[in-house]
Structure formats: C-alpha cells, structure tokens
Amino acid sequence: MKLLSTSEAASKLGVTERRVRSMIAEGKLAAHKLGRDYAIEEELLKTVPVYGKRGRPSRESMARVNRKLKKVAS
C-alpha cells in the first residue's frame, strides 16, 4: 500500500491540490488524516471520477452545448 500526499494525488489525477481536498471533504476520495495533512492510498485514485480538463470550458464546446439545448427546447 503506497500512500500519497495531496500534491502527489493531484498530480496523478491532473487536478489541483484544492480539488483533491474538496473531493476528500465531499467523501468522493477516502484519505487518512495525518496531523494537518492527508495521506491517500494510490489504489484509491483508480476509483475517482475526474471529468475533463481543468479550467473554464472552451467557447467551441459551450457553443456546441448551446446548439444542443436549442434543439431540445424547440
């Protein structure tokens, strides 16, 4: 069982450390509290759904979503 810090887990998941801490707080990622930090089992990272890339959606993807919504609404 290999334990990772929040920064190592964030790097492997492709998200920020803040997002990892949020997932822990939301109960989406199990972790062991060690003092003020968390230790995360590497095997548990395989069970965490991570959606897409970081940041704001591109204009193209938002335009595609808006077109689909307009079709559904009409």
Image (cartoon, rainbow, N blue to C red):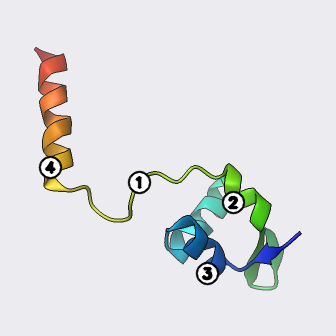
Labelled disc at residue 45: 2
What residue is drawn where x is 20% and y is 37%? 65
Q: CA distance from mark 4 to mark 3?
A: 31 Å
Q: Is residue 58 above or below residue 20?
A: above
Along the line of sight, which residue is nearer the eye, 35 or 58? 58
Secondary structure at numbered mark 1? loop
Residue at the disc numbered 1: 52
Quadrant of the rendered structure where residue 26 is?
Answer: bottom right
Q: Residue at the top extreme?
A: 74
Query: Who comes first in sequence, dot 2 or dot 1?
Result: 2
Type of amino acid at the residue the image marks with label 1? Gly
Type of amino acid at the residue the image marks with label 4? Glu
Along the line of sight, which residue is nearer the eye, 1 or 40? 1
Q: CA distance from mark 2 to mark 1?
A: 16 Å
Query: Who comes first in sequence, dot 1 or dot 4?
Result: 1
Q: Is residue 38 left or right of residue 69?
A: right
Residue at the disc numbered 3: 7
Residue at the disc numbered 4: 60
